[in-house]
Amino acid sequence: MAPSAMTRWTKSLSEAQPVPYWLEDPGKPHPEPALTGAETCDLLVVGGGYSGLWTALNAKERDPKREVVLLEGREVGWAASGRNGGFCAASLTHGLSNGLTRWPDEIRTLRRLGERNLDEIEAALARHGIDCDFERTGEIDVATETYQAWELRDWHQELADKGLADGIEFLDADAVREQVNSPTFEAGLYDRRGVAMLHPAKLAWGLKRACVRLGVRVYEHTPALTLKPYGAGMAVRTPYGSVRARRVALGTNIFPSLLRRVRSYTVPVYDYALMTEPLTADQLASIGWKNRQGLGDSANQFHYFRLSADNRILWGGYDAIYPYGGRVRAEYDDRPETYAKLAGHFFTCFPQLEGVRFTHTWGGAIDTCSRFSAFFGTAHHGRVAYAAGYTGLGVGATRFGADVMLDLLSGEETERTRLEMVRKKPLPFPPEPLAWTGIALTKWSLARADAHGGRRNLWLRTMDRLGLGFDS
């Protein structure tokens, strides 16, 4: 990047605040008091992100008499659930391609369950009066290189041949630019119904309010410190108290699991995003985007972008940063060198918006597993269930994961628990320094593939054969 271009683009960041745009909303609720003393309940949910909130809500809807307690170490929605891009996808498998590769015999079932899950999310928002700027706009995967355009066309044909292309439309360069006008777009694949856009923090806060109304006892600023058997149930210790529960659901995702043996299945990948000031009517007209779809490009190092309710553009992705040792730390949430890079990419995509300012910059950790989609399990003779590893697509899939955990805790076999995806786990990540070395080599190889027409080197082909990956 030339120094003059760097200076021009980074000027757009001069007034940006290094805080998540979503979490600054004036509708942010006050936190619930911390737990002090001893609690007992039927179900204890650990984690106040989407995973834990959906678990608590669905548990009460299944059985209103069930006593449910939810513990959150900080405040509801402060981590990934309040920092993501707000893409709520029907896919449970991190896209059809990943699902077809890993579970070809189950892909139709997984797709049907995912579509039903998205419909049920929309219904739950209406039922509980949750206003989170939910828009069922769909998403376009765009090609910014000629080889990517051919790959999208071939992939659409493959989906059609397999009977999986319903609701998915291939767009040539003219058609995709009619939807969103960027000189870099060469083709697109438009999923018209399988993705909704929403305000992620408002979703978390709305779920919290719904849980409290149904009688869930929510404690914030209450980290769970230990998990141990206690009689016929389990006991969790907190800084100022304890909870005894018949069953426990763990929705802590990227944070170290209370079950030590689960920790090697995920690594934190730090993802970063920018948010522009609201676009003027003329600026918005210059790029079109009348249908307000979410967008993502087709490179290995990809960007995702969307419009907010007040017509800002969120622009995120590309860099996926793994810290040595897999530690989750607050200082990793801010990365100016990535913001400068993302700003340059933004104005390359939308040169007609030069002069637009960014108001917010932020980052956050994604719970990444080697198969890119969630895994599940139980411990302590079925008294504890867990779900983790959503790898950036948890906005929608966490509700499905909540139902899986509740099914597992009930001990009853269901269509969900019979899935191979639920019964089998991904390969764990190796210890350091092997994890860092392997991830660094994979990132280098992915960048090289993007620069060489998508051609995957021996390392990536080997990882593909082993079913291993690194993605955000």
Image: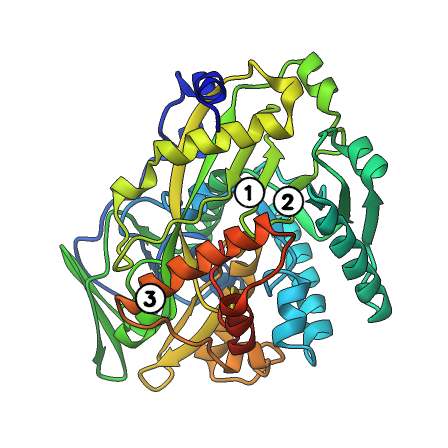
Q: Secondary structure at mark 1?
A: loop
Query: What residue would you read off at disc 3?
Result: 435
Separation (CA) of disc 3 from disc 2: 27 Å
Residue at the image position 48 percent from the left and 24 percent from the top: 2
Binning the other alpha carbons within 10 Å of mark 3 as few (below 14), some (14 to 19) or many (20 upward) gives some
Label 1 with label 3: CB-CB less than 8 Å: no
Disc 3 marks a residue whose amino acid type is Ala
| Number of residue marks | 3
Q: Position of residue 283 (x, y in %)?
A: 67, 16
- Please tell me which of labels 2 and 1 falls first in the chain: 1
- Quickly name the residue at label 2: 297
Q: Residues within 10 Å of mark 1 (few under 14, many from 20)?
A: many
Rendered position, 262 above or below 13: below
Q: Secondary structure at mark 2?
A: strand
Q: Label 2 amino acid?
A: Asp
Q: The residue under label 1 is which amino acid type?
A: Gly
- Image side of residue 421 versus residue 43, left or right: right
Q: Nearer the viewer, residue 5 or 154?
A: 5
Q: Where's residue 129, x and y in %?
A: 58, 42
Vertical side of 12 occupied by 150: above or below: below
Secondary structure beneath dot 3 equals helix
Foreground mark, 2 or 1?
Answer: 2
**Can I make out residue 452 in this image?**
yes
Task: From the viewer's side, name the closer residue of 225 and 245.
Answer: 225
Q: Earlier in the sequence, mark 1 or mark 3?
A: 1
Where does label 1 land, which residue? 86
Displayed quadrant of residue 351: top right
Q: Quadrant of residue 187?
A: top right
Q: Residue at x 61, y 75 (%)?
A: 102
